[in-house]
Amino acid sequence: MKAHHSIVIGNKNIGHYYWIGHCSNGMQYSAGQTFKSAVKGRLKNISVFPEMILGEGDASISLYEFDEQTHSWKHKLAETHLNVGKKHANQWLYFDMGNIVIDNKKHYAFKVNCNHSSMMAIGENHWSEKDPYPDGEEWTASSHNKDGRFHRNFDLAFTAEIETD
């Protein structure tokens, strides 16, 4: 029987925060991160760090294949939800990704959203840090710019646990 090993990729440096969710003025904000795995394996979870959570609601992470050349979101591979509230603030939130097989030759991206009038301030790297996670970039979007934009020198604070054989 083979032993399984897990590796964790990502960026745990937290300096600033990006608000996601529904604002009282009707605006919706989302964020995400592109990444590439160092190994082929099964994606166990993705975690983000909310410093603050306003309201109670549903937080979700959607995982996509990603075309780095064209900055295009490909088909959705998985989506998972957590019920979040103030008690979940200031700690890592782990979203179970159901053992999705990922390949180290492909790029991936995830989007983080909050629904039901809730908002989260999720961690991102310090502005003074230049590209702390070189295998990806942060993505942000709003109701006014649903396609969003990518930020090459910024990254969300996130981890992804990948299990290998």
Image: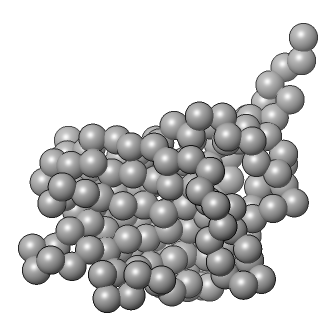
Coordinates of residue 9 in the picture (x, y in percent): 68, 53
Q: How many marks?
A: 0
Q: Nearer the viewer, residue 15 or 152?
A: 152
In the image, residue 42 above or below residue 151: above
Residue under the image location 44 percent in, 79 percent down: 140
- Image quarter (top left, top right, bottom left or bottom right) of the C terminus: top right
Q: How is the image coloured?
A: one colour
Q: Residue furthest front?
A: 75
Coordinates of residue 17 in the picture (x, y in percent): 35, 71
Is residue 152 left or right of 53 when viewed as pictured? right
Residue under the image location 39 percent in, 51 percent down: 60
Asked whether residue 96 is in view, the answer is: yes
Q: For residue 119, what is the image quadrant?
A: bottom left
Coordinates of residue 108 in the picture (x, y in percent): 68, 62
Is residue 105 left or right of 79 when viewed as pictured? right
- Image quarter (top left, top right, bottom left or bottom right) of the N terminus: top right
Residue under the image location 20 percent in, 41 percent down: 87
Asked whether residue 51 is in view, the answer is: no
Q: Nearer the viewer, residue 123 or 111?
A: 111
Residue under the image location 54 percent in, 75 percent down: 138
Q: Residue furthest left?
A: 24
In the image, residue 61 above or below residue 27: above
Q: For residue 52, what is the image quadrant?
A: bottom left
Is residue 82 left or right of 124 when viewed as pictured? left
Coordinates of residue 70 in the picture (x, y in percent): 72, 84
